[in-house]
Every structure is written in C-alpha cells, then in structure tokens.
Image: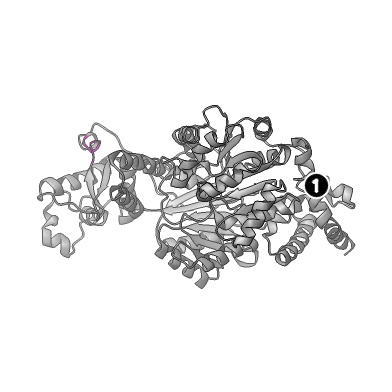
Amino acid sequence: MPDQYEVLRKVFGYTDFRGDQEQIIRQVVDGGDAVVLMPTGGGKSLCYQVPALVREGCAIVVSPLIALMADQVGALRQLGVSAAYLNSTQLPEERAEVERAFLSGQLDLLYVAPERLSQPATRQLLGRGTIALIAIDEAHCVSQWGHDFRPDYLALGELAELWPQVPRIALTATATERTHTEITERLHLENARHFVASFDRPNISYRIEPKDRVQQQLLEFIRAEGFAGDTALTGIVYALSRNSVEKIAQFLCANGIDAMPYHAGLDAQVRERTLRRFLREDGVVVVATIAFGMGIDKPDVRFVAHVDLPKSVEGYYQETGRAGRDGLPSVAWMAYGLADVVQQRRLIDMSDGDQAHRMAQGRLLDAMLALCETATCRRVQLLRYFGQEIEPCGNCDTCLNPPATWDGTVASQKVLSTVWRLDREWNGQRYGAGHLIDILLGRSNQRIEQFGHDRLSTYGIGTELDANAWKGVIRQLIAQGLLAPHGDYGVLTLTEASAAVLGGRQTVILREEAKRVRSRSSSGAKRTATELSGEDGALFEALRRWRAAVAKEADAPAYTVFANKTLEALAQVRPGSLDELLTVSGIGQAKADKYGEAVLAVIADFDAA
C-alpha cells in the first residue's frame, strides 16, 4: 500500500499537509481513533480520504446530506479514486452494483447516511466486507446541545461495539467544549486522540448592522461589495421562515440579482435544480432556511448574509463558514433588530423541551446577542465562545469603524421605569417596545389615550432620543438581561437584574448604532474571482472559461475540475510540459492525465495571442 505522503502528492496534487492533518492522518492510518475539530475549509476531508487510500479495505463515510453524495463521489472520481454511495435516490440495480463493488474490494470510499447505516441490512453488508475506517462527518449533529441535532446520529455510538478494531474519526467544523464532550461520549470515543484547530477564518470579514428595511439593506450590501453586475459572484442569504425566503428571493430577482429560494416546502425537484445551479454556476445567490449548506463543498462562496438573527453562535459560525473556503476575501453580513430578539425568545418559550432545555437555549441566544452588541472585535468575541483567544483582527466592522459607547444609565432607567409603572400602577399591563417608545416620546395615539398612558410620569421624558435610538436602547437592554420578552405578543418585562439599575446601583454602558462600513478587502471596488491582475489575471479568466466549458460538458461542479487556487497557480507558473504541470499545487496524476494537454493548450494559446 502507498504511504500517506505518496497519496497526498500523486492523488491530491499537494506536497505538504496543513496544520494538524499529518498527525491526524498518522493516528488513523496506525489504527487509532480521532476527534477532529477544524474550521470549514481547513481540510477535514483529507483527514479520512488519505487514510482510506493507505489502509486496506473501504472507508465508510457517514454523511448527513443525501443530496450532496453524488457530487462528493464525483469529485473523488475526478481524482481517480474509486468511490460510491448508497442512498434512497438509487434504483435497486444501482445499489446492487455498489454492494457488489464493496464486497469485491473495488471501493476505496463508500458514503452512507446515518439513517441507512442504522438499518440491519446495511450493517450485515458492511460486516461481510473489509472496512478500512469509519468517518463520521458533521459529528456535532450527535449533540443535543449543539445547533443541528440529528436523532439518527445517536445510533452511531453502536459502531464501536460492532467493529471494535476499525479506527473511527469524528469530524466537525464547530463545537463548544460541551458539544465536544458530548460527541466524545455519545460516539464512545473516550480513547481517541483529540485535535482542535484554530477556528479563526481570517479571510472572512464579519459585519453586523441594525435592521432597517432589511431587503433594501441586503441589496445595497450586495451591490456595494461588487457581488452584482458583470462580476456577479456566488452567495448565500439565510432567513428564518419560508415566507421570508420567498419574498427576499423575489425582491432580489426584481432588482437584477440571480437569486433562487430554497426551503423544505419546495418540491424536491425544484430544490435539486437549485442546488445543481448553485454548485455548477457562478453568480448564483441562494436564499434559504438554515437547512441549506451543510456539507456543501463549494469553495468560492463570496458572501453569506443573515437577514434574521441565528439561534446560536455555533449555528452562525457554521453558516458563515460556508463563505471563502478557498481562502480568498469574503464577507459575513447580518442585519438584526429588536423584533428578532423578541421572536427568538418567544420560540424558546414555546419549545417542547423542559425548563432545563429552555434555559440552555436561552444561554445560546444570550451569547449570540453578546456577539451582535459587542463594541469590541467581533472575531475576538466569536472565537472566545469556542474557548480560543486572539488579538483584535482589524477586519470586522467594529475594528474598521469602532463604535462609540455612552453612559446609557439614565435612558435605561426611563425604559425600565416605564415598564415598572405600567405593571404596578396600571393593573399589570404589559406592552411591547413600540408602545414603550410612544410613551417615552410623548406621542398621542388611540391606544395611549384609551388607557390614559399620557398620565404616566414617564410620558414624554425621552425626547432626547429618536425612535430608532430607543429601539437600540431596548435591544441592548434585552441583550444585557435587563429586560425580557414574555409571551406570544412580545411584551417586555423586568428581570431580577433590573432592580440594580432602577435603584442607581448599576451603570449601563451602551454602544452607539454603528455606521455601515465596507470591508477593507473590497473598499467598494468590484470584486473578481481572483486577486491576480494584469496578464496573470487575464490568463486566470481564460482558464476559468475553459474550466466552465469542461464542467458543463461533464455536468459537474467547476471546482471539481480545478479549484480557483489551482487556476491562480497555473496563471502564475505557466507550465509548459506535463512534468511542470505536476508541480502545481492541486494537480495530481489523474487530473494531469485527464486535463493536462488541454490546460497546456490554453496557456500556450494565451501566450501566443
């Protein structure tokens, strides 16, 4: 059998491992178990793909998304790797052919969903073959404290008893210490080596702004960053509801953005067409619920936008991590507002879980609010959530345009006093933020006159701020735990911590609403698919057009032919022979044999022009 270094060079076209890859691969090749926490784009797949080609037998890869298995297998076959999948999309004769290939030892990797792996027939099949290793991808799905719990993952712990001599590797791009512990316990990986890489994605610029006409804000962001027009690039927009997904996709299309909706309520064929276009074409924006994106190996997503507040920092990190897997500058943008906080609190209160579960969900939301409202570096706050410390990044909105803070104690007391007086002096009446702001601004409307709220001592005492500023104050009071939404209608109530502020024993520091800023990487300029310029940039585009034609003919995603980074290296190195071609990062023997002559012809034609 070849060793891992030979596989890396000849199959994948790389000369060196990155980060912990070498140690992880050695651990699995030697028959040991591993738990791997590594950011999206950090090279997790190589950690089981390389050992699969070194060890005897076939690697079993547990993947949660059936829709992506064909592309994952197709990408490996482009490399000359014998890979297949078993899932419900196949005809009986197709599954039978895969089973025969597995039993005869012809497969290097076999992808299965956790649901199928739980079936007795599948386990009997695997027991008749030789298993090289078992890789459990998206392992955070096993954790009930994580952001994407999948009950079918719980049965994967039984694999340790079924095949005790087979090494297992569990991989995820996001996990807090609690989730990490639960992965270890539920999958019976107590004796595994643990590898925790840095979660920092320095190429992603994080930006969060107050929500105000969010559809227009989203459109302005896409246009200002150069993601539209002649150089339209790929992006994902996340919304909480199916209705929002549909409306935002329609709005973007009406304004010249090639946008498509994706959610569970759409016909399966429509979802499949959308996914295929997203994977195979440039300039496509998918507007989706959070179910979209897990497991997608598309490296050139240039932005991820959220128009609703995510439920947790883990979910936010996982979703934003789908941008910039190729290491090029990308943006994670979000607009969030007071209504988002109220909605998320209401969903927690209405959840089916017990009190402990609701409290846990509340803590997750509190951490997300802290990230949104921080006046310091967002990347520092984000990584601290995962137990990692870094210096301020200089590439997020709070670093590029540090928000001013102000002593909001008096303003906070005005809000809290209004809530207290409505509850105590007006027979337990409770209201939402809009009505509180009307009282503070001294507005006259039917509801205020009907209930006599113009007689409150706090009526009209808040005219030093406008309505938007008061929304910011209330939003931050909720984020700091000094106010709490209650019930189905988003009414606000005091918390135990409110008393210290009302009594003057606690100061409240608030951040001013940040101005919208552009990322340092774009500075408002048109983005392109590469940072190359001049002749190198022109050759890159010629290679990209060739790649698009090849991918279209093969009905495969373009990045499975060559990644953008490989095209960049080709444009800079300009190899003149097959031997020189093999020195370019990302080109192994199989791709050199398949595409080498055509690539050399593109380069030669460009140089001759």
Q: Is residue 191 above or below residue 87?
A: above
Q: Residues within 10 Å of mark 1 (few under 14, many from 20)?
A: many
Q: Which residue: 63% across, 43% down?
A: 128
Q: Is residue 173 above or below residue 282?
A: above
Residue 43 at x, y percent in the picture: 64, 42
Q: Main secondary structure of the magenta part?
A: loop
Q: Which residues are magenta?
A: 495-499
Classify the position of the N terminus by image quarter.
top right
Residue 207 or residue 257, whichever sits in front: 257
Residue 339 at x, y percent in the picture: 33, 55
Q: Is residue 606 visible?
A: yes
Residue 469 at x, y percent in the picture: 33, 52
Q: Is residue 68 above or below residue 360?
A: below
Q: Is residue 14 above or below residue 426?
A: above
The reply, left or right, for residue 605 in relation to residue 462 is right
The three-letter amino acid code for the residue at tag 1 is Val
Residue 196 or residue 386, whichever sits in front: 196
Query: Disc 1 on helix, strand or loop?
Result: loop
The reply, left or right, for residue 545 in relation to residue 163 is right
Q: Which residue: 66% across, 40% down?
A: 130
Residue 453 is one of the magenta-drawn residues: no
Q: Which residue is mark 1?
A: 584
| Image color mode | one colour
Q: Residue furthest top?
A: 191
Classify the position of the C terminus by image quarter.
bottom right
Total label count?
1
Residue 496 is one of the magenta-drawn residues: yes
